[in-house]
Amino acid sequence: MLDILITVFFILSVTFPVLHLYHCLPFFRDDDERSKRNPAIKEWMIKHGHEEEHGLSILIPCYNETGIVETSVRNMSSLPYRELEIIYINDGSTDDTMDDLHRLLELEHYSMKPAGKLEYQEVKQIYRSRLYPHVYVIDKKNGGKADALNAGIDYSLHEITITLDADTILDRDALHAVNDTFKDDHVVAAGGMVHVLQTKPNDSSKRLSLKHANMLLRVQVLDFLKAFYISKLSLVRFKALAVISGAFGIFRKQVLLDVGGYRNTIGEDIDITLRIHRLIAKDKKKKIRFISDAVGYTELPETWRDLTKQRVRWQKAYIDCVIHFSSFFGKTLFTKAVSFFYIFEAFLVGTIASYIMTGIVIVNMIYDPQNTYLNYMFFYMFWIFVFGVIYDVAAIRQGKHYGFTFSIKDSFRIMGAILFDIFIYRFVTMYFVMFGSISYFFNQKWNKVSRTGRKYGEEETESAA
């Protein structure tokens, strides 16, 4: 019986990664993923103002973002898009975030009328920038990230809403890629591609650099390549994307209003994605997309302490949504791909299997430490190594296909990161999953990750190591 159980979980744990690895390949692209126009013509139209632009509202919640907010303002003010409003929501910061926004934007009092369709904490004051008239600041009482986003949605004017973390910056062409995607009226939401900010070069090239990244950052780079260019890409093609990253999410405003805005929860990005899935479940034409050409960069944890906070919070969010959407998952488990993959891949294989396999190893250590335990360990480590190397290499190749490469000098750093990922980091992530799943029932705090305070840009010279 034990052997059968091990075999079943092993097959399941291999099936989903292999499926995504196969399904993410370029020849499985949907027609709407393909560029409709010559890039040179498109660039000329944008440059000369002939591109038809949807109105975009960028919402950036800020809670104690001193340091990184300057990088955000510098990036947001330089984006080459006309039909744009940028709204910073100061969510009751207790540091110098509001002072920084005053200094960077030269704010003046401004009157904006909310739509009054969402609930959120009291707004104390609205400001507008003298330097950049399309940039606004909402100063409100603290209510959490979901509350801040609801305030931003209620005050925003444009039909497309983009949500960014305060430590996220956008590539110059990102908004035009969003604009192209949302010309399809059936697209109701989308996620952009997110890379690691600490690996972004100072020039405008798409080359990523690991030179100033410590091992923890390097392995997270691999994590993001696998998550976005393999898993998310495959899940979108299955119509099963369960998480639009909070670092770079795009939504039609009306859809956000139709689902009642963001729920105050530990995982607002997963929650809003699943609620949109539930809303459009009966409309086969409605789509959620992944826009590989809409590229953003976000700052990632550089210490084990902050990484633990982030990953444990992510796992708590998964468990929260399993419980909150249990009825939806139960009714649509075999009729909606998002429910199938969420329960069988993310929950059964990604969470429950961690406890079962760990329990099996412990039992074998106790009752048969010399033979069975070693056999299982060698067998497990062999397949972990084989699939780990294939998956990491495939993710790097996928990144190259979409224009993001590493230099030759980074080859040894990449090899080291792959080995670290397979033999150490993979087991650490199991701890995050197991601990996060249990701690959800005892502690549902948000646990904000500390910012580095580093200023990114052309003058950036500090090391992230």
Image: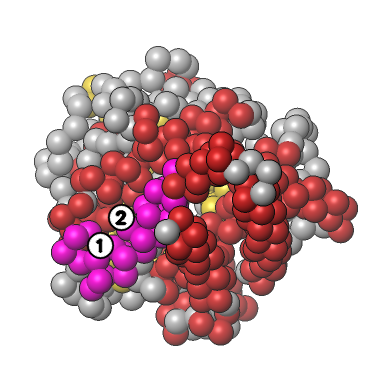
Q: Nearer the viewer, residue 198 or 221?
A: 221
Residue segment shown in magenta: 329-355
Residue toward you, 423 or 199: 423
Residue at x-position 42% and y-position 26%:
447
State yes or no: residue 337 in magenta.
yes
| Residue 69 circle label | none
Assess whether residue 212 is covered by the magenta stretch.
no
- Where, quadrant-wise, is the C terminus in this rendering? top right
Q: CA distance from mark 2 to mark 1?
A: 6 Å
Q: Amino acid at mark 2?
A: Thr
Q: Give percent across and percent down for residue 380.
A: 63, 55
User: Quick check: 316 above or below 342?
Assistant: above
Q: Are marks 2 and 1 in contact (CB under 8 Å)?
A: yes
Which quadrant would residue 207 be assigned to in this image? bottom right
- Predominant secondary structure in magenta? helix
Which residue is disc 2 drawn over?
A: 273
- Disc sitting over residue 277 in the figure: 1
| Residue at far right of view | 409
Residue 296 can be seen, yes or no = yes
Residue at the (25%, 71%) spot, across then down: 334
The x and y percentages for residue 445 are 34, 26
**At numbered mark 2, what does the secondary structure look like: helix, strand or loop?**
helix
Residue 272: x %, y % from top left? 28, 50
Instruction: Say which quadrant the N terminus sits in.
Output: bottom left
Query: Residue at image x 23%, y 77%?
Result: 284
Circle 1: residue type: His
For label 1, the SS is helix
Disc 1 residue crowd, few under 14, some 14–19, many 20+, Cα 10 Å: many
Q: How is the image coloured?
A: secondary structure
Looking at the image, can residue 101 be seen? no
- Residue 31 position, x and y percent, is 44, 84
